[in-house]
């Protein structure tokens, strides 16, 4: 190939690498701007709040004409680049959980979405995270290819030949390298699945505990039931902030945020230490050897007590909970104390108390399970060895490809580095699923809605419609009143507070309940 042709190829490669770096930097800047403009739960109600929503959730029936049709038509290309193709009503596979009562379902990408996924590659979060090693490997490969071409051009053919190595070593090592990456990714995915199962247990235990509290409202009392509900609704948020610290907390001496003294709540950071924290290990060792207390000066943080979960707790409970080192554990202990303080009655004996305690213990076990995943990382020797092998394999790969590919070694190594570093980064990102892989905010809101927000609607499930028919027919009511074992059974399953609210709204109470009143 003539010299002018090689210069053109080199120029195209340089332009390609420059375009990749520009696109990745632009996508990173755009992501930071979007993240900074998202809803901040620490803002006061009077401050403006911005919520970025995907256009996929803005669904309109076919044939509907809106006032912003021209704007949507003009921005259709940019929306397709960011969010993919627009879906019609008949193709939507999820429902809004608030409006329709359904569960939101994440999007699945099929083979027919290949074009959208390929074009939106610069917006990839994985590519942004690995942009430095990928660009470094591509630049190194480009330098090796230019050096090899320069030696051939200057007549130093022997030196150019000595730069090249056979492809057999890399072909033999690629299997071992693939096993290292696959084992790491599989172990990380198992931790991801286990983390989701733990939060599934939290959801189920919270619903069961709420059901028991409603069924035994007469024996427990309305005030105690509501206190348990508040603690139960605040528990997932406190657990989420423990395994993901500094999510909503801000330092007291932070100059970039303005604190409202009237509505701010001062507290220490509730963070679960990891097993690789050398400072915590040194403090623990000093305590064991010298007997000194491991308490030391800690930075003070503040939160807005009008936000979740702080506004769910009463002032008395909140003042004690914020001083605890492990706040979700304090909430579990408080619920256990509330259940233990329920007086014994014919309808609330040790059997019912054990049933309550079993669900409370399940919540406490979930705290330890989340801390186990958060604190225990993948063995550092394995992670470092896999990353070192991958780096050395990629650094030596240009010498095996430059003889056959020439100046195309740079773009080829760019793709190979993106593929292998991307697999490694995916395993790292899902290794601790509580740092963003799992949407814990959605799960926490779901528990709060089931426990508090839908309280009046859920209580209708405990109203037995056959009570009126049994009282009017007269069959079984005399036996019911005379039978001591069945005394109050209907009250256990139908809270009296529900009928009190219905009577206040003008509804009539069942005849059997009027007899007891």
Image (cartoon, rainbow, N blue to C red):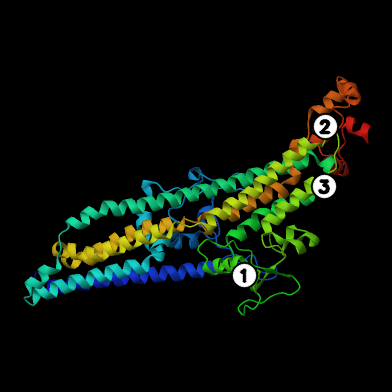
- Kindly check if marks 2 and 3 are in contact, taking CB atoms under 8 A apart as contact: no
Q: Is residue 205 visible?
A: yes
Which residue is at 44% across, 60% downward?
Answer: 82
Q: Nearer the viewer, residue 290 or 166?
A: 290
Residue that carries the numbered disc 3 in the rendered image: 341
The quarter of the image holding the N terminus is: bottom left
* Quarter of the figure with the C terminus: top right
- The kind of secondary structure element at disc 3 is loop
Neighbour tally class for label 2: few under 14, some 14-19, many 20 plus, Cα within 10 Å: some
Question: Of residues 10 and 158, which is closer to you in this image?
Answer: 158
Q: CA distance from mark 2 to mark 3?
A: 23 Å
Residue 490 circle label: 2
Q: Residue furthest bottom?
A: 255
Q: Are marks 3 and 1 in contact (CB under 8 Å)?
A: no
Q: Is residue 511 left or right of residue 340?
A: right
Measure the C-alpha gap from mark 3 to mark 1.
Answer: 41 Å
Q: Earlier in the sequence, mark 2 or mark 1?
A: 1
Q: Residues within 10 Å of mark 3 (few under 14, many from 20)?
A: few
Judge left or right: residue 181 versus residue 205. left
Q: How many marks?
A: 3
Residue nearest the observer in this picture, 500 or 303: 303
Q: Which residue is mark 1?
A: 290
Q: Is residue 102 above or below residue 489?
A: below
Mark 3 and mark 1 lie on one chain; the one further toward the N terminus is 1
Instruction: Mark 3 vs mark 1: give the one in front.
Output: 1
Q: Which of label 2 and label 3 is nearer to you?
A: 3
Can residue 95 be seen from the camera position used here?
no
């Amino acid at each position: 190939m003539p010299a002018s042709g090689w210069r053109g190829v080199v120029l195209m490669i340089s332009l390609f690498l420059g375009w990749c770096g520009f696109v990745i930097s632009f996508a990173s800047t755009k992501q930071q701007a979007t993240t900074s403009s998202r809803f901040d739960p620490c803002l006061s109600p009077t401050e403006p709040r911005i919520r970025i929503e995907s256009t996929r959730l803005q669904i309109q029936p076919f044939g509907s004409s809106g006032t912003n049709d021209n704007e949507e038509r003009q921005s259709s290309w940019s929306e397709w680049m960011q969010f993919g193709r627009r879906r019609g009503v008949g193709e939507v596979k999820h429902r809004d959980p608030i409006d329709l009562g359904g569960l939101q379902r994440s999007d699945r990408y099929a083979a027919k979405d290949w074009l959208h996924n390929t074009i939106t590659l610069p917006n990839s979060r994985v590519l942004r995270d690995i942009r430095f090693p990928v660009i470094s490997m591509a630049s190194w490969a480009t330098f090796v290819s230019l050096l090899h071409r320069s030696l051939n051009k200057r007549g130093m053919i022997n030196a150019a030949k000595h730069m090249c190595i056979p492809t057999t070593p890399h072909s033999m090592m690629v299997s071992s390298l693939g096993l290292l990456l696959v084992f790491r990714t599989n172990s990380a995915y198992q931790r991801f699945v286990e983390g989701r199962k733990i939060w599934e247990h939290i959801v189920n235990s919270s619903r069961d505990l709420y059901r028991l509290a409603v069924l035994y409202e007469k024996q427990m009392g309305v005030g105690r039931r509501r206190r348990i509900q508040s603690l139960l609704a605040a528990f997932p948020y406190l657990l989420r902030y423990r395994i993901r610290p500094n999510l909503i907390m801000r330092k007291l001496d932070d100059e970039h945020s303005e604190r409202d003294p009237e509505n701010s709540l001062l507290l220490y950071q509730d963070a679960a230490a990891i097993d690789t924290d050398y400072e915590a290990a040194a403090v623990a060792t000093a305590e064991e050897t010298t007997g000194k207390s491991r308490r030391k000066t800690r930075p003070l943080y503040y939160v807005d007590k009008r936000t979740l979960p702080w506004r769910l707790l009463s002032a008395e409970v909140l003042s004690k909970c914020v001083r605890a080192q492990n706040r979700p554990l304090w909430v579990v202990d408080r619920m256990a104390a509330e259940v233990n303080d329920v007086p014994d009655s014919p309808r609330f004996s040790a059997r019912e108390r054990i049933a309550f305690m079993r669900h409370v213990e399940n919540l406490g076990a979930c705290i330890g399970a989340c801390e186990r995943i958060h604190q225990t990382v993948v063995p550092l020797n394995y992670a470092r060895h896999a990353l070192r092998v991958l780096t050395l394999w990629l650094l030596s790969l240009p010498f095996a490809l430059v003889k056959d590919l020439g100046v195309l070694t740079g773009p080829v190594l760019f793709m190979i580095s993106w593929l292998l570093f991307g697999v490694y980064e995916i395993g790292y990102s899902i290794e601790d699923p509580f740092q963003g892989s799992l949407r814990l905010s959605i799960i926490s809101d779901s528990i709060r809605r089931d426990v508090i927000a839908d309280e009046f609607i859920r209580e209708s499930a405990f109203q037995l419609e056959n009570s009126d028919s049994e009282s009017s027919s007269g069959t079984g009511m005399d036996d019911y009143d005379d039978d001591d074992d069945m005394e109050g059974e209907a009250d256990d399953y139908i809270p009296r507070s529900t009928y009190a609210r219905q009577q206040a709204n003008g509804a009539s109470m069942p005849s059997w309940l009027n007899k007891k009143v």
